[in-house]
């Protein structure tokens, strides 16, 4: 009798958590509606936001966000200083308002790179500077390796490029499992994540304080939707093996690479990732920002824009789009 009562109580609690999770997801979706354009691609749609200058653009810049994020963070931070460029900020598959497309298979950074380039071949056939933050370092370096003719250069912001000691945090594995993942996400991961959102923001900005409006302007709460959270864990879980296999190829890079990172980044090691790829890439450059954590584009947006300007080159002789 007691066992039956405990099972019933557990089912009631679990049902309550699922209902609350779905309610939170609906509230978040209403609070942060899509602001850009939906592009039909095989398997669904990709969402991107485009910023255009008032006159002829100096060039084109493509922004790709990292883990636990979406297009809004990079665009809100760098967009105001890129007013003379055509800027395209993408939601990676399964994040923000982009569909996951191929389900769990889309966690592979190589697949994401291929899908995003297919989209960019249509909406931005001109060459561009690619700017990638954190986890997007893996897929952006794949783009640079496979499609160098499309890039004027690559700017990595605390980018993930190499395998790291310790591998993947344990909770990313059950969250990414096909059957267990959706249940684990709704019963445990998301309720915990909603409580850890602000401490998580503080950790990526440490040793500096997180901007008071970061979660709002970066639309970070979109991560609290079960589909986004599960896609995020799948991406993280797939990245370690991917960069392990890809890292030996970096000496083949044919485009300029600027690796910008903070010397206090406790999320993505500056030594393991940024410093190493800057040495391996034939046209690599390493920029280390003192007293800065995992968000160099917030700490020094002018440094990022300067790197973009240098990759595009002088204004004179540039053909407008």
Image: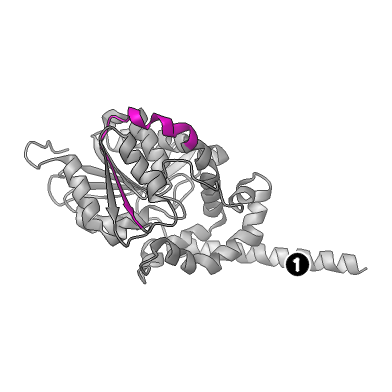
Q: Residue 42: in sight, yes or no?
A: no
Residue 258 part of the magenta segment: yes
- Name the image quarter holding residue 5: bottom right
* Along the viewing direction, whichever of 243 and 19 lies nearer the viewer: 243
Q: Residue at x 24, y 34 (%)?
A: 127
Q: Residues within 10 Å of mark 1 (few under 14, many from 20)?
A: few
Residue depicted at x 38% and y 47%: 271
Q: 239 left or right of 136? A: right
Segment colored magenta: 244-263
**Residue 257 seen in render:** yes
Q: Is residue 183 left or right of residue 208?
A: right
**Colouring style:** one colour
Which of 28 and 306 lies nearest the eye of the viewer? Answer: 306
Is the residue 27 above or below the residue 250 in the image? below
Q: Position of residue 203 (x, y in %)?
A: 44, 64
x%, y% of residue 61? 25, 44
Q: In which quarter of the image is the C terminus?
A: top left
According to the image, label 1 marks what residue? Answer: 12
Q: In which quarter of the image is the N terminus?
A: bottom right
**Residue 103 lies in the magenta stretch:** no
Corner quadrant of residue 20? bottom right
Residue 205, placed above or below residue 158: below
Q: Residue 310: horizontal and vertical position, in percent?
A: 17, 43
Q: Is residue 103 left or right of 41 when viewed as pictured? A: right
Coordinates of residue 171 in the picture (x, y in percent): 61, 54
Given residues 36 and 304, the one toward you in this image is 304
Quadrant of the image occupied by residue 128: top left
């Amino acid at each position: 009798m007691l066992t039956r009562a405990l099972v019933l109580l557990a089912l009631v609690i679990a049902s309550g958590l699922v209902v609350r999770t779905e309610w939170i997801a609906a509230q978040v979706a209403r609070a942060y509606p899509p602001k850009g354009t939906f592009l039909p691609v095989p398997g669904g749609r990709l969402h991107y936001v485009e910023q255009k200058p008032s006159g002829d653009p100096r060039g084109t810049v493509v922004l790709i966000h990292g883990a636990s994020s979406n297009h809004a963070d990079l665009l809100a931070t760098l967009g105001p200083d890129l007013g003379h460029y055509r800027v395209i900020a993408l939601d990676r598959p399964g994040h923000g308002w982009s569909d996951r497309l191929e389900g769990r298979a889309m966690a592979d950074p190589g697949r994401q790179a291929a899908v995003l380039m297919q989209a960019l071949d249509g909406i931005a056939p001109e060459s561009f500077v690619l700017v990638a933050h954190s986890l997007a370092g893996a897929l952006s370096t794949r783009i640079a390796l496979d499609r160098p003719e499309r890039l004027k250069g690559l700017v990595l912001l605390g980018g993930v490029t190499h395998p790291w000691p310790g591998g993947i945090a344990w909770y990313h594995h059950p969250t990414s499992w096909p059957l267990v993942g959706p249940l684990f996400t709704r019963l445990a991961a998301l309720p915990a994540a909603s409580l850890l959102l602000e401490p998580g923001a503080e950790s990526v900005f440490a040793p500096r304080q997180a901007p008071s409006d970061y979660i709002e302007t970066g639309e970070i709460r979109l991560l609290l939707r079960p589909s986004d959270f599960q896609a995020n864990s799948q991406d993280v879980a797939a990245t370690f093996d991917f960069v392990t296999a890809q890292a030996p190829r970096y000496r083949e890079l044919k485009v300029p690479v600027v690796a910008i990172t903070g010397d206090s980044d406790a999320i993505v090691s500056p030594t393991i990732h940024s410093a190493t790829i800057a040495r391996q890439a034939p046209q690599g450059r390493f920029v280390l920002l003192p007293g800065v954590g995992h968000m160099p584009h917030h700490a020094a947006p002018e440094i990022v824009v300067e790197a973009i300007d240098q990759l595009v080159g002088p204004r004179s002789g540039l053909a407008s789009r």
